[in-house]
Amino acid sequence: MLPQKRKSTDPLPMLRQRSRTPVWLALSWRILLALALIGVALAVHWFDREGLRDNSDGHVSLIDVVYFTMITVTTVGYGDIVPVTDRARLFDTFVVTPVRLFVWLIFLGTAYNFVFKQVWEKWRMRVLQRDLRGHVIVAGHGTSGTEAVAELVRRGRKPGEIVVIDPRADALEKAEGEGVVVLAGDATRNSTLEAVKIGRASALIVAAGRDDTSILIVLTARRLATELPISVVIRSEDNEALARQAGANTVINPASFAGLLLAGSTSGPHLADYMMDLAGLHGAVSLHERSVAPGEIGRPLSDIATGLGLRIYRGEQRYGFWQPQVALLEAGDRIIEVVPTGR
């Protein structure tokens, strides 16, 4: 199944976080609160209408009370109807005036949330999308995706340089709490990956939780970014080859890795510990990949000063530290080394 092409007229999805409260419900609560406050003022004015004076006809009717309440709550009044008793004046001073302020705050807050804030957020997200470059995209924020984001941050990647894609609001809320950029969407669609500027990303991590979904994401991403490094979590060994055929550079099977650790622990008590040390940044050493430095060209892998050289990648070939090809490093080689943590 090939990924669907986006029509030129379809708008790109925006980087955003959906609120758990529907817009209509939030607006209804604000309106009801404002009406309740006005209703309190109206009721008290009606029961204490003897404390009001109508300067036009001298009689305070229900319409006069409604008029006086609305004018007093929204403004300071026009003077045609005024409180004349101490009780009425104290009520207007200590109740109606705070009600007026609360009502205005409700209206201003509503205008901000539903008009100005949306305009501001849309503008900010457009700027964010425009400036995305060299970022890491994480498709799926489940267990593996969460650990990947945490490890990226530990390795020095700024949270603002990580974009998490997930259709689940709870997953996005958790990711946003980590300070990363989030997008609610389906990473199998062209429009979603285009919205996070996949063509300008430095890497894509796919941890969708389902092998079929993960492979489809890889296939879609590879069509949009032919040179992008793509790493994918595959849970079934049978699907590893399919993920590579779809375009993944690195296929990781958590079950296989756990098996390696368990099997290694039977051969020696410290093998699994050292493998975990290499895999993350929690221990004293870690694995590091880099390009060969100009001053290292023509020298053997064993002479590098930054760490312990283990392997080089030369084009499509890989050579271990025991092979004769690593005796002379060449321009374009990629070095895999063990370095002290923090380097």
Image: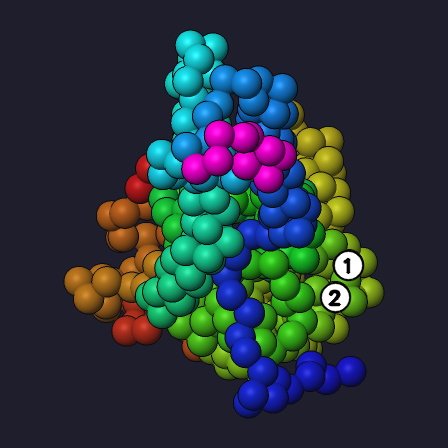
Q: CA distance from mark 1 to mark 2?
A: 5 Å
Residue found farthest to the bottom? 8
Task: Give the residues drawn in magenta, as a range.
Answer: 56-64
- Residue 142's spot in the image, x, y percent? 67, 46
Q: Quadrant of the C terminus?
A: top left
Question: Magenta span: helix, strand or loop, mainly?
Answer: loop
Q: Horizontal placement of 168 versus 85: left or right?
A: right
Please name the residue that numbered disc 1 is placed on: 210
Q: Quadrant of residue 189?
A: bottom right
Q: Residue furthest top?
A: 86
Give the quarter of the image for residue 63. Answer: top right
Label 2: which secondary element: helix
Task: Tell me the residue at 38%/64% (across/down).
Answer: 123
Q: How is the image coloured?
A: rainbow
Along the line of sight, the residue nearer the viewer: 307 or 132 = 132
Q: Residue at x 23, y 68 (%)?
A: 298
Q: For the residue marked with disc 2, what is the amino acid? A: Thr
Instruction: Please report the residue visible at 55 percent of the width from the left and 30 percent of the height from the top.
Output: 60
Residue carrying label 2: 213
